Amino acid sequence: MFLKTIALQNFRLHQSCALSFEKPITVIVGENASGKTSIAEAIHVLATGKSFRASKTLQMVAFGSELARIKGKIMSGVENDRLIEDNLENGNLYKRSDEKPDQNSEEQELVELEVILTNGMVNGRKTSYRLFSVNEVKRQQRKAVGILKSVVFRPEDMRLVEGSPPRRRSYLDTPLQLLYPAYDQALRAYERHLKARNKLLLQVREGEQPHSVLKYWTQSILRHGQIVQKYRRELIGSAAGFEFALHFHLEYLPSVISEDRLAQYTEREILAGHTLIGPHKDDLRINFYPKPGLDEKDLALYGSRGQQRLGVLWLKLVEMKFIEQVAGERPLLLLDDIFSELDEESRQVVQTQLDRGQTIITTTDQDLAEQLKVQFAGQVQVEQL
């Protein structure tokens, strides 16, 4: 898999922008507010259907425009696409052979992806906020995302260590939803039924509904919640034994959902007016070994800023490794203005990953671009904004 081109129309501040990627490493250089991050965001939307910045679709549409358009062409294996189709239809896990597609092989074909973003109205008619197509054929979102695979690393990710549990749950959900349709379906169903159950808990508390109305929704969140936690354990388990500059250990902190625990918490949940246990309360903790022979410590509490940076890098590399293992191909690595946030040790760790697959870097630092051109001779192209 290799992203060959990206074209934007009325996306953020880009009225029209087109880039071709010919080298494994592309460095996009520009001043602040020149639109570098918007390009990385657009690639991420093409891959996942979601923005890592916008809470609403219309925020990505240029002011005064009804729609924005993102088009990308990727070199993708024919067999890979067939497996994606099978997986989407039957909800099974990916099943890959050990043989990985060769970028220059005749087995590769050019696939065109397109996402149209709207403010809900086009030419006076209501329309979907996001429209997807593959090779100019309209597709449902679940059949268009995941063909291009990417992992994004940006300054905000530094808060994965010290930030809130929802941020860490998102770290788990993003690759799992793209790789496993069964996970995506279970998570979406869990969130819908959790909302309905919470509404009923309030009504039961106020005497507007009997206890019996909770039974269906309790069984539903139990069924879907157990699926969600099963897949999350799989992702976290994949981090074991992953070698790195510092030894880290990813610990899953599930709010275990079971029939017994739901029965145990029912009265307290009625009093609280919301569900107290389940995947929506899950968290994870990054532990590390400060020195050989010492007990592991919580990175958020005991790690230095440099160690925490390395911990976040490790998380991103774990995500890349997991996607590659499951999907059989290395995802595109997006490094959005991250080098300015890293110390020298962390920079060196990042640079060891740059020649292992396609990487797109955004930066304000022209010197960095020149340094990478020397370090990775013949593998780097520089685009100026």
Image (spheres, rainbow, N blue to C red):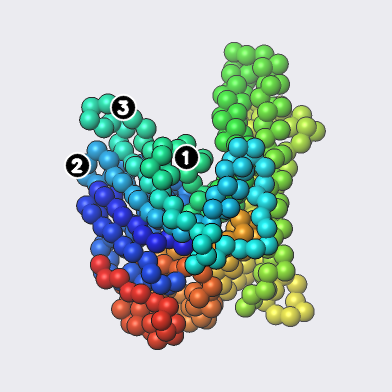
* Residue placed under numbered mark 1 in the picture: 141
Vertical relation: 261 (above or below) 13: above
Figure disc tally: 3
> Quick check: marks 3 and 2 in contact, CB under 8 Å?
no
- Residue 347 in the image: state x and y as whole percent: 48, 78
> Quick check: marks 1 and 2 in contact, CB under 8 Å?
no
Q: Earlier in the sequence, mark 3 or mark 2?
A: 2
Q: Secondary structure at mark 2?
A: loop
- Residue 303 in the image: state x and y as whole percent: 60, 71
**Front one among 97 and 280:** 97
Residue at image position (22%, 52%) is: 15
Q: Which label belongs to residue 126?
A: 3
Residue extending farthest to the bottom is: 374
Which amino acid does the dot numbered 3 rest on?
Lys
Residue at image position (61%, 48%) is: 83
Q: Which label belongs to residue 24?
A: none
| Residue 105 in sight here | yes
- Label 3: few (<14), some (14–19) or many (≥20) C-alpha neighbours in 10 Å: few
| Residue 316 in sight here | no
- Residue 79 in the image: state x and y as whole percent: 58, 53
- Residue 75 in the image: state x and y as whole percent: 46, 59
Going by the image, does 148 lie left or right of 221?
A: left
